[in-house]
Amino acid sequence: MTFNTGAALLDAIVLAVVSKEEAGTYGYKITQDVRRAIDISESTLYPVLRRLQKDDCLQVYDMECGGRNRRYYKITQAGEAQLRLYSDEWKRYSQKISALFAGEELA
């Protein structure tokens, strides 16, 4: 069974992946890294990247690679702040869900 992944969780996962590369990373590598956690297609990923760029969470630049330009994505300060918010919220959310699965009472 696969759980549905909402837009906020996709944004958080992509920001987490991009934040690992100080100089930035490119779309195909982002897709491969995200696929380690969830099943995602490139056609799903690129709108997420565009939305994060529009929201000033990602900076985009092109760099020559093998005679072609490759588009790179780098997390911004706003993106780092958003990632911290997502991370904090995920910790609270996942603890509550784990407690439910363990049969614990929620406060």
Image (cartoon, rainbow, N blue to C red):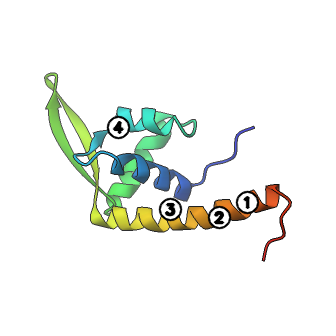
Residues packed near mark 2 inside 10 Å, few (<14), some (14 to 19) or many (20 plus) = few
Cα distance in 3D space between marks 1 and 4: 32 Å
Q: Amino acid at mark 3?
A: Ser
Cα distance in 3D space between marks 4 and 2: 28 Å
Q: Is residue 90 left or right of residue 80?
A: right
Label of residue 93 in the image: 2
Which element is circle 4 on? helix
Q: Are marks 1 and 2 in contact (CB under 8 Å)?
A: yes
Label of residue 27 in the image: 4
Q: Amino acid at mark 1?
A: Ile
Residue for point 32% across, 56% down: 53
Up the image or down, 46 lies above or below 68; here it is: below
Q: Is residue 24 left or right of residue 79?
A: left
Q: Can you tell which quarter of the image residue 104 is in?
A: bottom right
Query: Which residue corresponds to mark 1?
Result: 97
- Identify the residue at the far top of this view: 66
Query: Which residue corresponds to mark 3?
Result: 87
Image location of residue 44, percent across then percent down: 49, 41
Q: Can you tell which quarter of the image residue 52 is in?
A: bottom left
Which label lies toward us, 1 or 4? 1
